[in-house]
Amino acid sequence: MGTPAGGDITQLLLAWRGGDQESLKRLVPLVYEELRRLAHRRLRAQPLEHSLQTTALVQEVYLKLAGSGNLVFKDRVHFLAICANMLRRILVDSARSRNTYKRGGGAWRVPFEEEVLGNEGMTADIVQLDDAMEALARVDSRKATAIELRFFGGLSVEETAEELGVSRETVLRDWRMARAWLKSELSRASHG
């Protein structure tokens, strides 16, 4: 089963924003599949003992979306960007809670595909990754957002460029620099 065309979701989001309640009925199944795809991608890399499942993670994102009724989505890419941030926050909060409960034990490890940090097999604690991304955001928020959109949101280079309002080349440059910065930070954290 393929992903729905981005235009379908965008048109339905715009129609819903315009007050068309019928579009919401058609939007929910499409959005659910997008969220499920994102959640599954992030959770399949988690240890077996983690407590979140794909459906539960999607429901958490839905609850956050429903609870913030003032959100306005420009299009599918903007929607996925917001969901990527929510997904990251839920995973990190869950990991922090688990780490607190176990006093540092059982931290979730995040394996990075080669495309993310350029080092197949490299792993990092999701809390360490979040800390590194927060530090990167203080230095260069656009680069941190690019990593979040691509890694947590699963957006393509083109979609990331669209959301950030920059060129494809700028995203690729930001991506390379942010990956190098994060690798350095995560290496320092694991050895420090």
Image: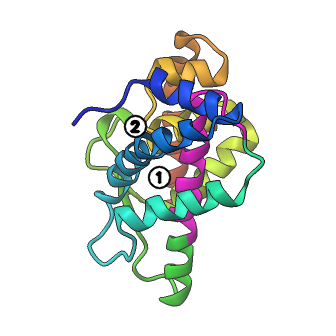
| Pick the front one: 128 or 152 | 152
Magenta-tinted stretch = 72-93
Decide: marks 2, 1 in contact (CB < 8 A)? no
Residue found at x 60% / y 27%:
75
Residue at label 1? Answer: 187
Q: How is the image coloured?
A: rainbow
- Label at residue 176: none
Instruction: Check residue 149 for magenta coloring.
Output: no
- Pointer 2: what residue? 116
Who is closer to the viewer here, 121 or 100? 100
Majority secondary structure in the magenta region: helix
Work out whether 152 lies above or below 20. Answer: below
162 horizontally vs 29: left or right:
right
The percent coordinates of residue 51 (x first, y second) are 38, 77
In the image: residue 174, left or right of residue 32: right
Q: Residues within 10 Å of mark 1 (few under 14, many from 20)?
A: few
Q: Secondary structure at mark 2?
A: helix
Q: Position of residue 64 (x, y in %)?
A: 63, 60
Q: Is residue 78 magenta?
A: yes
Residue 68: image quadrant is bottom right
Q: Is 111 positioned to the left or the right of 176 in the image?
A: left
Image position of 25 with respect to 98: above or below: above
Query: What's under tag 1, amino acid-wise?
Result: Ser
Question: Which of the two labelled residues, at mark 2 and mark 1, occupies the earlier sequence position?
Answer: 2
Quarter containing the C terminus: bottom right
Residue 181 visible in the snapshot: no
Residue in the image at 59% along x and 54% along y: 86
Q: In the picture, which quadrant includes the N terminus?
A: top left
